[in-house]
Image: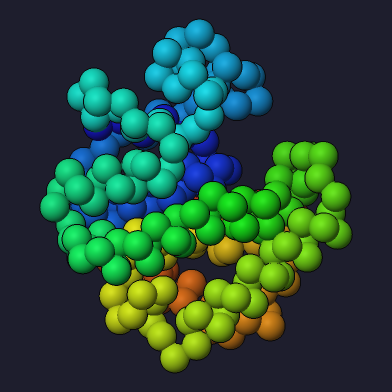
Amino acid sequence: MKLYHHPLSGHSHRVHLFLSLLGVPYELVEVDLAAGAHKAPEFLKLNPFGQVPVLDDDGAVIADSSAILVYLARKYGRTDWLPEQALAAARIQKWLSVAAGEIAYGPCAARLVTVFGADFRTDEVIARAHRILALIEAELAGRTFLLGDNPVIADVALYSYIANAPEGNVDISAYPSVRAWLARIEALPGFVGFRKTKIGLAA
């Protein structure tokens, strides 16, 4: 099983983290984004969208971080991470959509400005980040993880960009429940951190 990734990509880190939490064997293959390797013909055969991460499981190729999380949970029968019950599955899907929406256009986008020089309106993406962080703070109040006492793939999907949000000048000090949740994820057996960059508030 090969994971094509980049160490500064939060989308890649989600999958790296989940593979490690599952304790399954895998090989990391770093894709040189700066050199345009993700747009090279060989990589585009794996993912025509030209994005990381991509998982190659003995010829079964899956792109998109959320899709890979679902694939891994189902492949290994980990109903603790992705329950089969309709309501729990729907709640997880909601948070996967948040990861692809509000997180991507909030804390992720703010970090893209500082780490990669992306052309976003800084004030706007930071404001979006605080809006979603406030909602997550309320969701986590009195709760250990997003759905209850145990982590699910939704927690993994949201972790990376929230953990490194200060790199995008997003201050998370006002969100004690979020910070406690981050610490609980970091205490899970098999946890691997998202590479830090000394920039923004993390400088």
Percent from the top left, x then y, of residue 154?
40, 61
- The front one of 94 and 170 is 94
- Judge whether 108 appears above or below 203 on screen: above
Percent from the top left, x then y, of residue 34?
65, 25
Which residue is at 68% across, 80% downward?
173
Percent from the top left, x then y, of residue 126?
77, 62
Which residue is at 48% across, 72% downward?
182
* Colouring convention used in this rendered image of the protein: rainbow
The C terminus lies in quadrant: bottom right
Displayed quadrant of residue 94: bottom left
Q: Total number of numbered labels?
A: 0
- The front one of 86 and 71 is 86
Instruction: Give the left or right position of residue 154, taking residue 126 as reference.
Output: left
Which residue reaches farthest front?
A: 86
Displayed quadrant of residue 128: bottom right
Instruction: Give the left or right position of residue 166, taking residue 9 as reference.
Output: right
Which residue reaches farthest bottom?
A: 142
Asked whether the viewer can see residue 168, the reply is: yes
The N terminus lies in quadrant: top left
Instruction: Give the left or right position of residue 32, taking residue 143 as reference.
Output: right
Instruction: Give the left or right position of residue 121, taking residue 28 as reference.
Output: right
- Judge whether 51 appears above or below 95 on screen: above
Asked whether the viewer can see residue 190, the reply is: no
